[in-house]
Image (tube, helix red, strand yellow):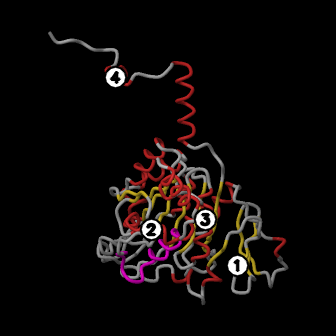
Amino acid sequence: MSAVLMSDAVTAAATPLSAKDFATDQEVRWCPGCGDYSILKQVQTILPQTGIPREQIVIISGIGCSSRFPYYMNTYGMHSIHGRATAIASGLKATRPELSVWIVTGDGDGLSIGGNHTIHLLRRNFDVNILLFNNQIYGLTKGQYSPTSEVHKVTKSTPAGSLDHPFNPMALAMGAEGTFLARSMDRDPKHLQQMLLRANAHHGASFLEIYQNCNIFNDGAFEIFTEKGTRAAETLVLEQGKPLIYGTAKDKGIRMDGYKPQLVDLNAGGYSADDLWIHDEADMYKAQMITRFFDDPTAEGHFPRPFGVFYAKERSTYEDDMQLQIQEMVATKGKGNLDKLLSGKETWTIG
């Protein structure tokens, strides 16, 4: 490389990136008003803050509205096949562990046809970031019910109402031994940016569920959690080391009655913030309980829906363990011979 070109490369590397640097020249083709626009904007906003070069970032998606994401990100990417983004990302991370790999999927793509791949990636703990856009509907195929649609949901594929019990994505990820579980929403850009940065900083598989409004086929599905008039009373913002307090006047809380969570009114009953459950992201048992705060918001006495980091734990990643295993085998047996391995010990010659 010439001195001039080398100087240009150094200057380019030293120049801070901006959100615009992560946007492509492709026309963004989602329905006007779709929540995907907000998620795209927040991802493009936080990536410069990570300091990771664009050529070290890969966005992998499956099939669905969310899966158009790689076209709009000025990084490496792959629009793969239905439900298999997690499998492809696992292979990439295993062979190129230095890359920052992001999986963009939806409740249909990642929890239906791709559900098996999702749970195995989580238990293996590859160091990748899963962004699961949950709109509780199949949007790309025009409005069929999805694995997260509520019971009795009337759609084109369930005209008499769905009989399926919906997935609880957080509980599913917790059961799959996920090491970083969080939830945010498209209509809270500041919170979403915080969760994206936390997910990126985690060494291991991060699972970020994002409530995303499909204004064409399931408009208002999360309105009770996003609108000013109901949000404070219906959402619980999880903050490390702080009590579980919510409500319009921050007058409601959750305490532990033995091993059972209990809703309390801080203006009555003699309870104060000192009596409340203190959130601890490292507490696996409490995290499991928080994932079950998944009540029907219209039911009397229901718990608020949590947003934030549910659980975060450091555990060795698959690719790190694999590299160590390879090094140990090479140290004890030497480098292998691929042709010899493929031919095996039982061969014969045809005369």
Q: Quadrant of the C terminus?
A: top left
| Front position in the image: 322 or 245 | 322
Question: Mark 2 highlights which residue?
Answer: 148
Q: Point out the tag, 1 or 3, that comes first from the N-terminus.
A: 3
Q: Secondary structure at mark 3?
A: helix
Q: Examine the rendered structure and indicate whether residue 145 appears above or below residue 114.
A: below
Examine the structure image and report whether residue 195 is included in the region drawn in magenta: no
Q: Secondary structure at mark 2?
A: loop
Mark 2 vs mark 3: in front: 3
Q: Measure the alpha-carbon separation of dots 3 and 4.
A: 45 Å
Q: How many marks?
A: 4
Mark 4 vs mark 1: in front: 4
Marks 2 & 3, CB-CB < 8 Å contact: no
Question: Mark 3 highlights which residue?
Answer: 49
Question: Mark 1 highlights which residue?
Answer: 246
Q: Measure the alpha-carbon separation of dots 4 and 2.
A: 47 Å
Q: Measure the alpha-carbon separation of dots 2 and 3.
A: 32 Å
Quadrant of res 338: top left
Quadrant of res 226: bottom right
Q: Amino acid at mark 2?
A: Thr
Q: Point out the tag, 4 or 1, that comes first from the N-terminus.
A: 1
Q: Which residues are magenta?
A: 28-44
Q: Looking at the picture, how far across and down is residue 84, in whole percent?
A: 37, 53
